[in-house]
Image (cartoon, helix red, strand yellow):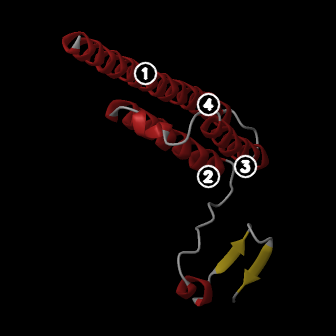
């Protein structure tokens, strides 16, 4: 009788261990699926917006497209679980980085082609008071030192 209880106990522990292991595998598979979804959506958005930016007719359209791209990235990131980006492979991260670098290069090139000067961000108080013309667009305040 004691041997039967021992065997049943071991079988129960084994079944619990097996079920926890299979749940963990499903969780890992789901995390990977989420990472693949994040990768594919990000690459697709970067490709579409890069193409659209290259065909923009004026600087207002370039700015509007870039703002919509930023909003789209936020939507994509909120559509997957938090920390899903940790599940991306090194190659996937590199691809996303290269696509975003290309998008930024096209953005800057189109603004230059259309005669719009790229606004340098304020990186310190020194640059603010150094006599440069500075536009703080996020605060909708323009400060001009001459």
Measured in 3D between alpha carbons, the distance from the residue under mark 2 to the one under mark 4, in whole angstroms, is: 23 Å
Horizontal and vertical percent position of residue 55: 68, 32
Could you tell which of marks 1 and 4 lies nearer the N-terminus?
1
Instruction: Report the residue marked by disc 2.
Output: 112
Left or right placement of residue 136 versus residue 38 in this view: right
Q: CA distance from mark 2 to mark 3?
A: 13 Å
Q: Say which of marks 1 and 4 sits in front.
A: 1
Q: Tell me how far mark 2 sits from mark 1, CA to CA.
A: 54 Å
Point out the image quarter for the N terminus: top left
The Cα–Cα distance between marks 1 and 3, rounded to whole angstroms, is 46 Å
Foreground: 129 or 45?
Answer: 45
Q: Secondary structure at mark 3?
A: helix
Question: Foreground mark, 2 or 4?
Answer: 4
Q: CA distance from mark 4 to mark 3?
A: 16 Å
Label 1 residue SS: helix
Q: Nearer the viewer, residue 7 or 26?
A: 7
- Sort mark 3 into few (<14), some (14-19) or many (20+) by Cα contacts within 10 Å: some
* Pointer 2 or 4: first along the chain: 4
The reply to whether callout 4 and callout 3 are in contact (CB within 8 Å) is no
Residue 83, compared with residue 139, is above or below; it is above
**Sooner in the amino-acid sequence: mark 4 or mark 3:** 4
Mark 1 touches mark 4? (CB < 8 Å): no
Q: Tell me where residue 63 appears, x and y as whole percent.
A: 72, 49
Marker disc for residue 63: 3
For the point 48% across and 29% down, the residue is: 35
**Viewer-side residue, 33 vs 126:** 33
Mark 2–mark 3 CB contact (< 8 Å): no
Q: Single out the mark in the foreground, 2 or 1.
A: 1
Residue receiving disc 1: 23
Q: Which of the 4 image quadrants contains residue 15? A: top left
- x and y percentages locating residue 14 in the rendered image: 29, 17
Q: Which residue is mark 4?
A: 45
């Amino acid at each position: 009788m004691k041997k039967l209880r021992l065997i049943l106990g071991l079988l129960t522990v084994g079944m619990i261990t097996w079920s926890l292991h299979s749940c963990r595998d499903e969780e890992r598979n789901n995390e990977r699926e989420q990472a693949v979804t994040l990768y594919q959506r990000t690459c697709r958005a970067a490709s579409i917006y890069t193409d659209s930016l290259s065909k923009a007719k004026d600087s207002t359209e370039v700015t509007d497209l870039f703002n919509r791209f930023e909003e789209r990235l936020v939507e994509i990131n909120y559509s997957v679980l938090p920390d899903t980006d940790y599940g991306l492979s090194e190659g996937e991260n590199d691809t996303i980085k290269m696509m975003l670098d290309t998008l930024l290069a096209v953005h800057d090139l189109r603004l230059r082609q259309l005669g719009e000067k790229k606004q340098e961000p304020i990186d310190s108080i020194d640059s603010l008071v150094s006599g440069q013309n500075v536009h703080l667009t996020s605060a909708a305040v323009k400060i001009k030192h001459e």
